[in-house]
Image (cartoon, helix red, strand yellow):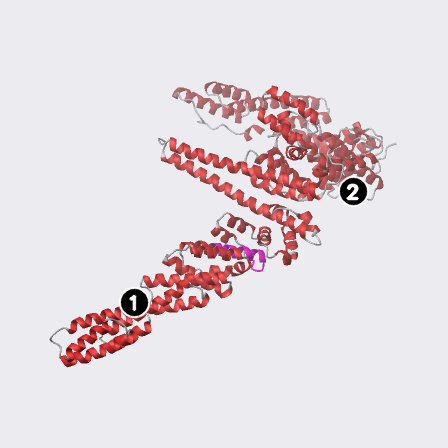
Amino acid sequence: MNPYRVLKIPKDATRQEIMQAVPLALQRKEFTAREIADAQKELMNPCTRKIAEFVYFLDSQTWTQEIQSEVKRSQDEIQGETSIQDLPLLHCFDKFQGE
Amino acid sequence: MGQSSQEKKIEFGQSPPDDRANRKKYQELLEKAEKLFQKEKFGSARHHFTEAQQIYPSEELQNRIHACEENAGRMALAQDLMRQGYQLEREKKLKDAFKTFQRSLEAWENREIRILAEKLQSKLPKPTLDPGFRLEAERRYAEAIERYKEVLEWEDNPQAKDRMGICLVKQGSYTEAAWLLEQSLSKDPEIRYYAGYALARLGHYGEALRQWEMIGQARPELNRQREKLLEIAVRDLLHRSRLEGEFESAYQEAVNLLSCYPALSLVRQCVRSMRLHHLEELWQQGKFEAILDFLSVRHPIPLQESGESEEFLPVILAKVYYRLAETNAEYLPEAITFWLTVIHNPKYLAPFNLRDQKDLPTAEGQDQLTLNLQQKLDQLIQHYKTRQKETGQKKSGQGEISLGKTRQGETRQRETRQEEEGRLKEILAHWEIEQMAVTFLREITQAQDPKPAQLRHALCTPAFAERFGHSSSILAILREVRPRWENDERFWIVGASFSAARMSLLLLQKDRVEEAMAALPAQKEDEFVNYCRQRIFFRLGMERLQKGETNLKKYFTQAVPLIQRFKEYEKEIIRLAQGIGDNQEKLISMDEVLQVLIRHITSSELLEITSYIMSYKANVLYSAGLIKVQDVERILKKALELHPGNEFARSGLQEMHSRQALEELTRALDKGNVKKAATITINAESDEAEEAFFDFIDVVLEELDSPLLDREKKILFLRDLYHQCERVDPSHPVLEDIAEELKDLEI
């Protein structure tokens, strides 16, 4: 069972936030007291918490950080905030050059 | 004639009304309506279709009514335009009249009007492109477009279309311009440039760049614009992909762009970033199967083509399959494959261990994480094992309670249970192999000095290797490290699991030996395939041996290298031999197998068991009267040669000797040859023989009492008898009896 879902807390919740989430979860009565206690125990232990993180979060930022920095680096090279509307028409191919 | 004749007719009699009168009326109405429709009398046709619809409503009739209305509308428009055309012709406005007739023909084809339009056209001067060119040069694009349109109304003119497309771009009408210019077959750089520009402005970056690629690289200003467009495209697509409902089109566009520039890192990263973002969204919504569909892993595609990177695909798949397998065993095999690969391969796991930690991951930290994640998978598998056990118990309990249920239902339940058990058994076999392979490879990477770096990064399970084409490189590394590991059987199992014999090995693990044999590849040079072959032959041989089948030499001859290398196989044969009992067939086949093996393997354990099995077999066959004493003697002597400590053979041999002596003794005594009988008794050195001899003497002495016998002959016979008995046992009491008898006779 996903302990983060049981306690309705984000991935980066602190120990204090975990403790605070327990009575709220008990009030909601969506899960049994046992399940809530297990979730709390799992997240309070750094070792089991790491496993829970691995299992219940995709953690795409593990790879996107690198990707986005490359994309951003490239974007930074563009001078100004150019959009497609600002892309000028080149007339070097025109057969009928206007005045 | 008009287009109406091409439209599909309603087939009469389709679901007609039940009432006979109504049915007749319905069919009459349909027939009439169809005739009117063919005659292009759409108003009347519509009226009849509507009446029929009131009797028996149907979708087909409704479509027909719509067709009548649409055709009537177009026809009315065409007639109106035709009237206008006539009027313009009368006013001598021939050009306008021609245009109006053309429009009428577009609305509804009419042969009469077509002839009239052609006649008018022949009277009109043919429009040229020059006015359009002039206007275009003066940047009067709207007017130029009108001139080009005139030309196009006159005839299909590709150049007019191209010029019109360019003017439309300059006017900012990109959709129409792109539609016109994309159709153009001209390779003129001007046309290709404007086509590309229009497409770019519409957001079709891939297509736009393709158009510009046709121009080549000669123009530096275009090259600069191309680079700029790429950057704009990447930013725009990334932005669009995050807007609600826009992902699909933006992603397709990005993939399209990537197909134009597969080597361009920026585009690759753009596609990867979009994919990851989308995957994260799907994950958060719990749409795990949608992730699989998105990654198309059910229909594998080459990674490079999809712009995918190996680093995150296995990790995502491991997580997705694990989450799916939590509720559906169908996903368990893939979960095992990806999970084991990811948790054992530092390439995949290291980023997770690194995160949230300021220091670099230590080897112990990595091992601990792997161990914990391994336990997570073990728990999942244990969950299925327990669940099946519980289901089995519950079902069998239900069977006991519901005695009233049909036998058929129970059979079905049993079959389903067996199927589930079989499926789980297969998954467990897959798990064992996958786990053994990846942990053994890891052990090699940790123990090998120098460490095989390639293997460290190629650490994966056999199923993973097969799927992503790593098997041959892993096999090459295994062959390199063979000298150090070849005496560990895991080396061979793991090698076979990465070789062409993988499927065969899996079947063997599932105890489906015959299927494993059938699945065995033909390569005879591959050592891992050969290992698998030897195991299959061994298992087949053992199965048949247990059944007491004969002619098993071929199986064990093939398996000799395996038994020689790994003692466990020899022990297995010995255990089977020890428990074989006195079953005649089983003893014969076991002896046959052992005789083959001792030709190649001369371990004392194997020689000992062979010696015993030979002795037992000889004993059983002799008892069944199937072999002679001489054969038994020969076999027992051979058994003793193999293992001199075989007491069973030794005592058996002695027993055989005494039996042999008894047989000879009986024959000699039957013939009354006491001298020979005494000699046999002396040589036999057996109490049994001596007893038999003296029992015979007792009988002889009793018979001598007969008065019919001559006294002299009796004396002679008794003296000889005394002598022979004395030879056998000089202290035997019978000697006194004979001596007494002789004394009486001699007096």
Q: Amino acid at mark 1?
A: Glu
- Chain name for mark 1: B
Query: Could you tell whether B216 is left or right of B89 in the image?
Result: right
Q: Quadrant of residue B254?
A: top right
- Image vertical order of residue B486 relative to residue B712, above or below: above
Q: Which residue is mark 2?
A: B215
Residue at 53% in and 45% down? B429
Mark 2 neighbour density, 10 Å: few (under 14) some (14–19) many (20 or more): some
Identify the residue under disc 1.
Answer: B688
Q: Is residue B527 magenta?
A: yes
For the residues carrying marks 2 and 1, which lies nearer the camera in this image?
1
Q: Is residue A44 visible?
A: yes
Q: Which residues are magenta?
A: B523-539
Q: CA distance from mark 2 to mark 1?
A: 116 Å
* Residue B582 image offset from top left, x and y in percent: 37, 57
Quadrant of residue B450 in the image? Answer: bottom right
What x and y, as percent, mark residue B125? 75, 32
**Residue toward you, B410 or B146:** B410
Quadrant position of the N terminus of chain B in the picture: top right
